[in-house]
Image: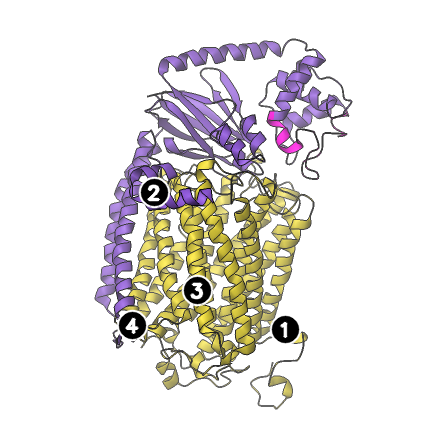
Chain colours: A yellow, B purple
């Protein structure tokens, strides 16, 4: 694209017409929208799987499906939610927001940007197509531990491996693009410590992606050769070790969970100051805390593996390192609360989501700390306590921040306001039902219900019943969310350029609906300072 | 609806600890020193978390109440304090160190299996447990009880009637009370995990490797657990039941089992009639094979092939014995069964379901091993 020249070619003024606009687009806003809609579609697909799981678990006995299909559902629910919904949604937010926040006209590598999106529907399609293959979809859990995923897996596993490789390509390209954009395309007058926290958290997340995704690719490649080419990386009869698979998987997997939460921290660090009408407390400590969490995420992986037969010294090390993560995470929570403290708060929908994020994510943090205590983990490990824990951090953490961000920036994306009354109804519906869904799972886990079982003993019946009812209500809330977003796009009242009184950031200096090409000339130092979170 | 009312009354009555116990809201205290230690540790961390939550959420809720625009709050503009940042970095570190000290003690204790007085080897199979007493020469397999398999797709009343639904097996593991037992845990196929909550023992069973754990059980009784690592289709259907008995009862049980083992070894040396093989074979089949190949031999094609008309069941006996002994792809090995049981089940598979295969004798299996 020759956006730098001032030639008056119509092609450069607006988007192309019709379907090919979306196929050929290199515009960060278009690609951001594609990512968001893709992620939302996958959220509904993964949610439908969850509804199937909760329906089978509504009552004891097998009513709706056989155990093998149940395992396929839990596996695909996890994979689709992690790789299809949460990660693409954050990349979509990054695409939409990062260029506007750093005063850049677009992403640094726009054509690669197009490619990294368009890989996703194919990767997702390959993953989902395994349901229709002989032997069914992968049924070994989203963690795909060998040898259940190698020697004992259905043939469709090779398609799963190909799908994961594609998803990895897409994520790595997305990460490279964000690093290149932030470091090279940032407005010349913007210093690193002027950058909004969402940009900071995404920059750090990108380095996690680049470090972790190749490890995942290595793990699935070893699976592929174990399955098809006679190697024995994970097979003890050939001199391999199944536990090595878990080391490799979690060396990817632990950074991965921070990949899904660091951008969420960024989002919340924008919303809380806006509606508290008060600058973000401790900007620089937020940046340092994010970096520390990212660093620690690389050296704690084996806390997922306390029961694999690790030596005591290993268990002690991983327990201490894991406990340390509570410190920078705590700093973040304290900073958010200090931002609210003596502010002048109002509670528009994005703020409601952000506040409930702080509450519920912290609950997930507490259960995470408990899980990190190696001896206690003996009783928690692989029970519903773990299920409750990671749904509190991923649903009421990561997903909550994505929904908060959607309401917060929707006016800037569409130039229109959503229906505030309806959005509040949706918020209360979701926040109540999600707790009915996941809170009883703590009790189930402590009482001894293992995860990933399709049927259970009768003493677990009551809490499973409550949890399923909460699950159905929570699932239904997404119908209302879909309506609110579409209603905003179609019939929303016009928004102002800065619809939130206390909002800071370069994106709010653009037109009410951010123009297709923004910041063709970089913002001035004065404007950057005015809009900086680090004031 | 009935469930909903019981539940509501339970929630109302939650103040009383009885209800806590009945509805299983908290971790079990268990019956071993390890499980007590873990419980104490769990409660300590829990209350620390509650205390932190009260302070943090308290401050937040107060702020949400007091510092709102509708109450006329005017925003202050402070946004930095190195002192505050230092305080809320250092105070949590101190709390964490205080938590780490008891956690370290418990961890070191529970990993020390050197004081064991006896050993039980536990092997996970898809989807059953095998228990070996290497010193006593006892070995048996423990499956989900048939009466429970039968009601998985039955009515609620059936499931209530069987008692301990899904937590009952055909042969219990038997251990003596007040004895330090070392468990050696391994697997024959995929990764399983042997978990009895009341012992505080949960350990992965890795194929090709042996893990260990120990427990000294203080109280006579029956304790139940489950496999805790996803191990395939019937992961939810491989429970663990342990009878802890007095030392005298245990000695009696050991001599009984040794007699049973001797009888089984003898039966492998004799020649069986076809009718005997078929009767024995049907029970072995229903316990070990029907989970995948179904009671009526219809299987779940294409993952689990049908027995009816199977080229293997109707083909050469040697191939059939080979596949049952050594497994193939998703089919696990069954070499842990006795020669007589294997001969019976293979004969049954070759002659039931309309199949017309040959009869297999225990000696055929012995020589094929």
Say which mark, if any, is on residue A366.
none
- Tell which tag, 1 or 3, sits nearer the viewer: 3
Residue that mark 3 sits on: A427
Of A119 and A370, the residue lying toward us? A370
Residue A329 pos. (x, y %): 34, 58
Distance from the alpha carbon under mark 3 to that under mark 4: 19 Å
Q: Which residue is mark 4?
A: B68
Vertical comparison of A189 with A207: above or below: below
The answer to whether one can see residue A87 in this image is: no
Residue at image position (29%, 50%) is: B49
Q: Nearer the viewer, mark 2 or mark 4?
A: 4
Quadrant where the C terminus of chain A lies?
A: bottom left
The quadrant holding residue A165 is: bottom right
Query: Which residue lies at the image location 40% right of the left edge and 82% below the top edge?
Result: A189
- Using the image as rendered, state which of residue A418 and residue A219 is in the foreground: A418
Residue B309 position within the rendered picture, expressed as x and y whole percent measured from the top left: 77, 29
Badges 1 and 3: C-beta atoms under 8 Å apart? no
Residue assigned mark 1: A22
> Is the C-beta separation of discs 3 and 4 under 8 Å?
no
Residue of label 2: A316
- The alpha-carbon separation of the residues under discs 1 and 3 comes to 31 Å
Query: SS of the residue at dot 1?
Result: helix
Q: Are marks 2 and 3 on the same chain?
A: yes
Q: Residues within 10 Å of mark 2 (few under 14, many from 20)?
A: many
């Amino acid at each position: 694209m020759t956006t730098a020249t001032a030639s008056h070619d119509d092609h450069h003024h607006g988007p192309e017409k019709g379907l090919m606009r979306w196929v050929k687009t290199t515009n960060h806003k278009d690609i951001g929208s594609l990512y968001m809609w893709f992620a939302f579609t996958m959220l509904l697909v993964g949610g439908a799987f969850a509804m199937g799981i909760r329906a089978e678990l509504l009552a004891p006995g097998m009513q709706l499906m056989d155990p093998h299909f149940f395992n396929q559902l839990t596996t695909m629910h996890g994979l689709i939610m992690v790789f299809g919904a949460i990660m693409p949604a954050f990349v979509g937010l990054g695409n939409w927001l990062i260029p506007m926040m750093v005063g850049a006209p677009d992403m640094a590598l726009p054509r690669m940007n197009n490619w990294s999106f368009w890989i996703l529907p194919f990767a997702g399609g390959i993953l989902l197509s395994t349901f229709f293959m002989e032997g069914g979809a992968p049924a070994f859990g989203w963690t795909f531990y060998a040898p259940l995923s190698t020697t004992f897996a259905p043939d469709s596993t090779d398609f799963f491996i190909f799908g994961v490789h594609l998803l990895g390509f897409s994520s790595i390209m997305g990460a490279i693009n964000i690093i290149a954009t932030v470091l090279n395309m940032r407005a010349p007058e913007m210093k690193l410590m002027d950058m909004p926290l969402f940009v900071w958290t995404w920059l750090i997340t990108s380095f996690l992606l680049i470090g972790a995704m190749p490890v995942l690719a290595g793990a699935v490649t070893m699976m592929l050769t174990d399955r098809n080419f006679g190697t024995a990386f994970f097979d003890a009869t050939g001199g391999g070790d199944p536990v090595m698979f878990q080391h490799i998987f979690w060396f990817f997997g632990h950074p991965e969970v921070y990949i899904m939460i660091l951008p969420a921290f960024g989002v919340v660090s924008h919303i809380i100051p806006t509606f508290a009408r008060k600058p973000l407390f401790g900007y620089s400590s937020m940046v340092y805390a994010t970096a520390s969490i990212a660093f620690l995420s690389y050296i704690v992986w084996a806390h997922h593996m306390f029961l694999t037969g690790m030596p005591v010294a290993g268990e002690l090390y991983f327990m201490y390192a894991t406990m340390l993560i509570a410190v920078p995470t705590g700093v973040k929570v304290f900073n958010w609360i200090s931002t609210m403290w003596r502010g002048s708060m109002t509670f528009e929908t994005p703020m409601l989501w952000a506040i409930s994020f702080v509450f519920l994510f912290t609950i997930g943090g507490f259960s995470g700390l408990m899980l990190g205590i190696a001896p206690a983990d003996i009783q928690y490990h692989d029970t519903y306590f773990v299920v409750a824990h990671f749904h509190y951090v991923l649903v009421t953490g990561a997903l909550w921040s994505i929904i908060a961000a959607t309401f917060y920036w929707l006016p800037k994306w569409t130039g229109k306001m959503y229906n505030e009354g309806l959005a509040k109804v949706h918020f209360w519906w979701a926040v109540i039902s999600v707790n009915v869904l996941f809170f009883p799972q703590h009790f189930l886990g402590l009482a001894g219900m293992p995860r990933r079982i399709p049927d259970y003993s009768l003493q677990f019946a009551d809490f499973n019943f409550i949890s399923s009812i909460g699950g159905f209500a929570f699932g239904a809330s997404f119908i209302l969310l879909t309506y609110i977003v579409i209603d905003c796009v179609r019939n929303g009242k016009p928004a102002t350029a800065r619809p939130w009184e206390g909002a800071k950031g370069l994106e709010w200096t653009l037109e009410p609906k951010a123009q297709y090409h923004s910041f063709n000339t970089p913002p001035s130092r004065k404007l950057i300072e005015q809009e900086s979170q680090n004031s | 609806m009935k469930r909903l009312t019981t539940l509501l009354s339970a929630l109302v009555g939650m103040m009383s600890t009885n209800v806590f116990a009945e509805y299983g809201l908290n971790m079990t205290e268990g019956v071993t020193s390890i499980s007590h230690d873990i419980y104490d540790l769990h409660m300590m961390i829990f209350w620390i978390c509650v205390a932190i939550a009260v302070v943090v959420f308290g401050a937040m809720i107060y702020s949400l109440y007091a510092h709102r625009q509708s109450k006329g709050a005017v925003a202050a503009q402070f946004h930095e304090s190195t002192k505050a940042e230092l305080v809320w970095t250092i105070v949590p570190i101190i709390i964490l160190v205080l938590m780490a000290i008891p956690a370290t003690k418990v961890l070191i204790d529970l990993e020390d299996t050197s004081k064991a007085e006896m050993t039980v080897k536990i092997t996970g199979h898809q989807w059953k447990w095998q228990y070996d007493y290497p010193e006593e020469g006892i070995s048996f397999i423990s499956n989900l009880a048939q009466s429970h398999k039968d009601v998985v797709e039955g009515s609620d009343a059936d499931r209530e009637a069987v008692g301990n639904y899904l937590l009952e097996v055909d042969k219990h593991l038997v251990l003596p009370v007040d004895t330090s037992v070392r468990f050696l845990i391994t697997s024959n196929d995929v990764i399983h995990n042997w978990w009895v909550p009341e012992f505080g023992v949960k350990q992965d069973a890795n194929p090709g490797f042996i893990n260990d754990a120990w427990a000294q059980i203080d109280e006579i009784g029956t304790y139940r657990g489950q496999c805790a690592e996803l191990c395939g289709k019937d992961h939810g259907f491989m429970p663990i039941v342990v009878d802890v008995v007095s030392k005298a009862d245990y000695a009696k049980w050991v001599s009984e089992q040794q007699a049973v083992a001797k009888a089984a070894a003898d039966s492998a040396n004799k020649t069986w009639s076809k009718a005997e093989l078929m009767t024995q074979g049907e029970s072995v089949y229903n316990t070990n094979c029907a989970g995948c190949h179904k009671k009526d031999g219809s299987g779940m094609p294409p993952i689990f092939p049908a027995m009816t008309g199977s080229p293997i069941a109707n083909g050469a006996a040697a191939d059939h014995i080979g596949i049952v002994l050594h497994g193939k792809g998703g089919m696990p090995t069954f070499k842990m069964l006795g020669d007589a049981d294997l001969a019976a089940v293979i004969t049954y598979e070759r002659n039931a379901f309309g199949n017309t295969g040959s009869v297999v004798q225990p000696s055929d299996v012995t020589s094929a091993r």
